[in-house]
Amino acid sequence: MKVLVTGSNGFIGKNLIAHLNEMTDIKVISFDKEDNFSKIEDSINEIDFIIHLAGINRPVDVKEFYEGNTDLTKKIVDLIKNKNIPILISSSIQAVKDNDYGKSKKLAEDYIKENLTNYYLFRLHNVFGKWCLPNYNSVTATFCYNIANNLEIKVSDPNNSLELIYIDDIISEFINVIKTKKATYYEDGFCYINPRYNITLGYMVEKLNEFKESMSSISVPNTGDEFIKKLYSTYISYVKVNELVTSAKMLTDERGFFSELVKFSGIGQISISSTKPHIVRGNHYHHTKLERFIVIRGKAKMRFKHIITNDYFEVDADETDLKIVTIPVGYTHNIENTGETDMMFIMWCNEVFDSNKPDTYFRKID
């Protein structure tokens, strides 16, 4: 399938083409503002689908709104109206507003409706995600870039809200339309992207500042929240790559080393530990804290004994058999290096360590 993408060098266009180029059954024909319209005319007979993303939202002259949003759309429509080539066009929720940008988008929408039948008209909300130009027309991109680069941001009213959609959700839906010729969310003649996130500017700034603070630590935000996951990925895309490296603290003694690697907001932490031959670690129990051990180097024996019933069991593990062992609450436990080389294991815990409430009680296994 040959897919024409207009606005190929724009924010959405770059992301879409990056995905389409990964698909072996699609060939992309790109068109951007530097290209002559004859490029579309010359290839129109071999095109199977059109994604029309090209448009103007920050012109020098108001008339550019109509040239880039209305007139270009009319030229494409006139070229295909007798060919039945399906076209997906990105419009905007601004099309209902009484400004030149909105008017130019509305005129393009109306022309499509009047002249075509095989179309998918998407009214997009505020889009965020990687590769969006900051300090242009996206407050999310501007805030991400400025905060990541220690630049000033201005928030006139932190209670102002905006409705956001994420770039990969858009791309997923566009590809779905190409493949199935059906839109998932359709209402009153327009297609929409879901999910949509209604958040305040104050909330966004708060989260972005938290992300910035976390860059020099091992803490990461609660990416179990879909919006936080997407906003965090977006923020990281604006951080200089050389600033994405931090160091973990390593605690060493005669037994080996221990290091906390990642602390997750609300879901615990991951640590790594090395143990010298024939050394035993542990001999303690927890009431609520859960742990999981994975031996990734060397050999180990894990022992467990119930603190009341004295029920006992043990597990052997080594690097050739990556056993994932959950440590039950109410069992005192230890892990011994039974090999002749250093043993290393990764440990997940269901809570971030709190020295004021460690929930760790010493009891040796006899």
Image: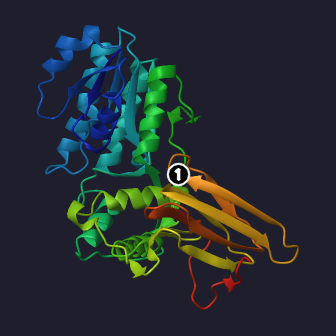
Q: How many labels does the image show?
A: 1
Q: In this view, does 106 lie to the left or right of 357?
A: left
Q: Which of 107 and 361 is in front in this view?
A: 361
Q: Nearer the viewer, residue 10 or 271?
A: 271
Quarter of the rendering occupied by the N terminus: top left
Query: In the displayed structure, would residue 178 be above or below residue 268?
Result: above
Badge 1 amino acid: Arg
Tell me residue 59's x, y (percent). 18, 49
Which residue lies at the image location 32% right of the left edge and 65% below the top edge?
144
Which residue lies at the image location 40% right of the left edge and 11% below the top edge?
84
- Other-residue count near label 1 (Cα within 10 Å), few / some / many at <14 / 14–19 / ≥20: some
Query: In the displayed structure, would residue 2 be above or below residue 210?
Result: above
Query: In the displayed structure, would residue 2 be above or below residue 355?
Result: above
Quarter of the rendering occupied by the C terminus: bottom right
- Taking the image as drawn, is residue 267 in sight? no
**Residue furthest bottom as drawn:** 356
Tell me residue 316's x, y (percent). 63, 56
Which residue lies at the image location 57% right of the left edge and 75% below the top edge?
281
Q: How is the image coloured?
A: rainbow
Res 292 → quadrant: bottom right
- Taking the image as drawn, is residue 196 in sight? yes
Q: Which of 152 and 321 is in front in this view?
A: 321
Label 1: element kind: loop
Tell me residue 134's x, y (percent). 25, 59
Q: In this view, does 175 lie to the left or right of 70?
A: right
Res 265 → quadrant: bottom right
Tell me residue 19's x, y (percent). 35, 33
Residue on which the image places disc 1: 196
Query: In the displayed structure, would residue 124 be above or below residue 244?
Result: above
